[in-house]
Amino acid sequence: MRRQIEGSQAVAAAVAVCRPEVICAYPISPQTHIVEALSATVKSGALAPCEFINVESEFAAMSVAIGASAAGARAYTATASQGLLYMAEAVYNAAGLGLPIVMTIANRAIGAPINIWNDHSDSMVMRDAGWIQLYAEDNQEAADLHVQAFALAERLSVPVMVCMDGFVLTHAFEEVDVPEQDVVDAFLPPYRPRQALDPSDPVTIGAMVGPEAFTEVRYLAHVNQLRALDAIPAIRAGFAAAFGRDTGGLVRPYRTDDADTVVVALGSVLGTVKDVADELRDDGVPVGVVGITTYRPFPFDAVRAALGSARRVVVVERAFSAGTGGIVTPDVRAAVPGTPCSTVVAGLGGRPITKASLRDVLSDAHGARLEPLTFLDLDLTNVERELARATAR
């Protein structure tokens, strides 16, 4: 059903029709509206059987999700920013145990200084935790990805993060075709856990593993991630057939066939980047865009195919590694060795990413003037003042 709806409410509705049996959460902006809506749905009886558990911390939220999933329940939670970091130990445990938990990340900057606005610093910290990571471009895709995430998690018995830009998407109202219950029921079968704790047949999970077997455990986790590269396109195709729209998948190319310069990005910034690409095309500048929906596992072959014969690649990143630079760029560079790749760090802490600034950057890239690492709209006056003050001590 098409509705004018807030992104958080659309995601909550999509999660509810997936029939989770345990929802556990600790509120943190900008994730709060999602779990508030789900708690109301559970309380009203519209989502049953389901237990909504209020916990005392994000670490507890993931711990409860682990317990519920290990006992054979379809489990869901959501978090953001420092909340994700607080549950870090349990996030790794969920992946190591092979539990198909689905978690929404309402992407938000990490302090200090405290900043509640959007960038990708939080989920990028967890890129190596063993979770599949999916990034939504808009609220329609955010809702659809949750349905696909439950199918993917349970097919492979691995946890999945669905990442949506905090405030930019979570608090934005737009028209969304919210998945209907009967169609979701036909697409997503009842949960049949691959492993479940049973008091009548007791086993130990998460036992200590010594040096003689730990490498094999980690290798198997890697293999499970790689299996997702085949499962995700298949689930995307099945979703398109069932719901009549094409969302999700590994990557989404846009006007790349004859592009000399291709921009790679994740999340909601893709809408702005596509608008700039269209404007530059009107001026005769052949620019294309590749949106990465699946960041972990990284789809090297799909990225390579999407970039085609691009002469240069610009990776727009909403997080970076201090002392190194881009986080996504090394993966993109590995997919297309020999193709010049520049990093543009943009939108940190919610700073607007304007078409004018992107147009300048892409014009520089097309003219081979773009530096390997650029901070979009960096205020050099303030930076130089602070550097001078620091060195004067």
Image (cartoon, rainbow, N blue to C red):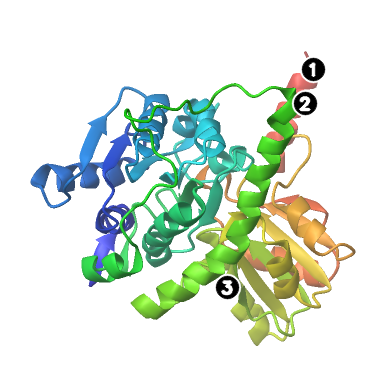
Direction from residue 87 to residue 388 in the image, left or right: right
Q: Give the residue type that dot 2 points to.
A: Ala
Q: Is residue 51 left or right of residue 367?
A: left
Q: Do the residues under discs 1 and 2 have CB atoms within 8 angstroms?
A: yes
Could you tell me how far apart the alpha carbons at marks 1 and 2 are, in whole angstroms?
A: 6 Å
Give the labeled residue for mark 1: 392
Alpha carbons under labels 3 and 1: distance apart: 45 Å
72 relative to 325 in the view: left or right: left
Q: Earlier in the sequence, mark 3 or mark 1?
A: 3
Q: Using the rendered image of the protein, determine whether residue 85 is visible from the camera's viewpoint.
A: no
Name which quarter of the figure residue 219 lies in.
top right
Three-letter amino acid code at disc 1?
Answer: Ala
Instruction: Give the x, y percent position of residue 204.
Output: 47, 25
Height in image: 141 above or below 344?
A: below
Dividing the image into 4 quarters, which one contains the N terminus?
bottom left
Vertical arrangement, residue 305 with respect to residue 343, above or below = below
Q: Which residue is mark 3?
A: 274
* Residue 244: numbered disc: none
Q: Is residue 42 visible?
A: yes
